Image: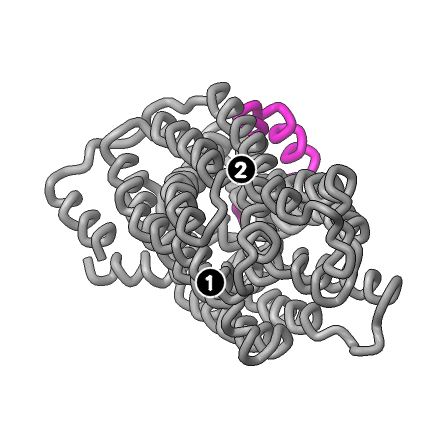
Amino acid sequence: MKTERWKSFNYAIGMFGTSIPINMLKTYAAIYYVDQLGLKTTQWALVLFIYTFIDAIDNPVYGFLSDRTRSKWGRRRPWLVIGTPMLVLGLIAFYNPPAFHSGEALFAYAMLFYIFTGTLDSVINANYGALFPEIFPDDASRAKTNAMRQAFQLVAMIISIALTPMVTGWIGYGWTSIVYSILGGAVILYMSLTSKEKEVTEEEEKPQLWHSLKSLFINRKFWIAGFANAFYSAAMSLVLASLPFFVKYRLQIPDAQATILFASVLLIAIASVAIWARFVRKHDLMWVWRVALGTLALAYVPLFFANSLITAIISAAFVGFGFAGVITTMDLIAARVMDEDTEKYNLRREGFISSALGFMNRLSGLFTSAAFYLIFIFFGFESGDNPGPQPGNASRFLLTVFPFVLMLISLLFSFFIDFKDRKPRISEDNTSGLDHYLDG
């Protein structure tokens, strides 16, 4: 039992490490480059647009290469150990642009290092995600471990999102990126060196590219789950990226108070993960997933009407509750897709499918790109130097209207997929062990 606990802990804490760098990149890139450095919203929209297509190409490639890797260190560990230092360097470079860069030079620099850092995040997450169904083969261990790793992710979000306005106020974005990168990288390496994946022999058949592409292309459940995840990811990416704008232009309170608003979302989410995990244990996974998606969609309605810090905190609490439900169930849906592929073809392609789902996730960049472009068209919001006549409404559109529509689409997709019930009933002995993890 003790070994099992450490097995779950060693893997789950990896989510803490992977979350810190990418959260800072995705949440504060826009406010830093657009509002502080003067990059135009149309230029930033183009960065997101181009990055999305590059990421669409590299994600499946990374997963395919990982599945075919044969080494004495395993399939996933070499990619994680080599990719992590490069991810660290990428984030540091992104938030430490040369002082003499401006205009087109700043635009090119932002694009280069946003893409570089983002693609290294794809390498890390494709391999980290592939380990999940490999190490934890049954729904009981998955529910337990996923509850732990989502809790770690939310703690990482408190640090890298909620506390960042305060931290950057003290030491600036450059030094903050250095601290966050080193912290996240160290945890990823710890997870990589302590999590033991299944042994793969040289004799085991390697996935072939054409067959993998063909089988994935005709996998209806992959596409439906992928699109549902993509629309949800776009909604939450917009929330994270637009909340600093909402605080500044809609609520008109000090930027540092964004910490309070972010914290209200994440603390409620942390408290709610155990609730949603119990729902998964006691009810049908698909039903719980749909309820979570619907809850998150409805949460944007009261947030639309928030006009003070207090009303925003109360509204954001509903977002945190729905967010916890989706992150608790989404990875379990992805694991089911991988399970069915393994059972059908007798091939282990977790890396390829994980990265392909990651590619679908990255499609969210198209929607976030469109949202930033639309606030320029609808509200004339160009940059921090020229926010237009209605910056408050522009930020509210980004934070509530666009995400609400995206979540409704995600919910719609969820009704077109189902899985055969493979979850065994958990015995009383196992229940006590699971409760220990969900409670503590």
- For badge 1, the amino acid type reads Thr
Colouring of the image? one colour
Q: Quadrant of residue 7?
A: bottom left
Residue 59 image position (x, y, % from top left):
66, 47
Can you see residue 379?
yes
Mark linked to residue 381:
none
Mark linked to residue 232:
2
Q: Residue furthest top?
A: 416
Residue 219 magenta-highlighted: yes
Q: Quadrant of residue 25?
A: bottom right
Q: Left or right of 73: which side holds 274?
A: left
Mark linked to residue 259:
1
Q: Quadrant of the C terminus?
A: bottom left
Foreground of the two, 312 or 177: 312
Residue at image position (53%, 57%) is 76
Residue at image position (82%, 66%) is 106
Which element type, helix, strand or loop, lies under badge 2? Answer: helix
Foreground of the two, 420 or 349: 420
| Mark 2 Cα shell of 10 Å, populated few (<14), some (14-19), many (≥20) | many
Q: Left or right of 102: which side holds 379?
A: left
**Measured Cα–Cα span from mark 2 to mark 1:** 23 Å
Residue 169 image position (x, y, % from top left):
56, 75
Residue contact at pointers 2 and 1, CB within 8 angstroms: no
In the image, the segment drawn in magenta is 202-225
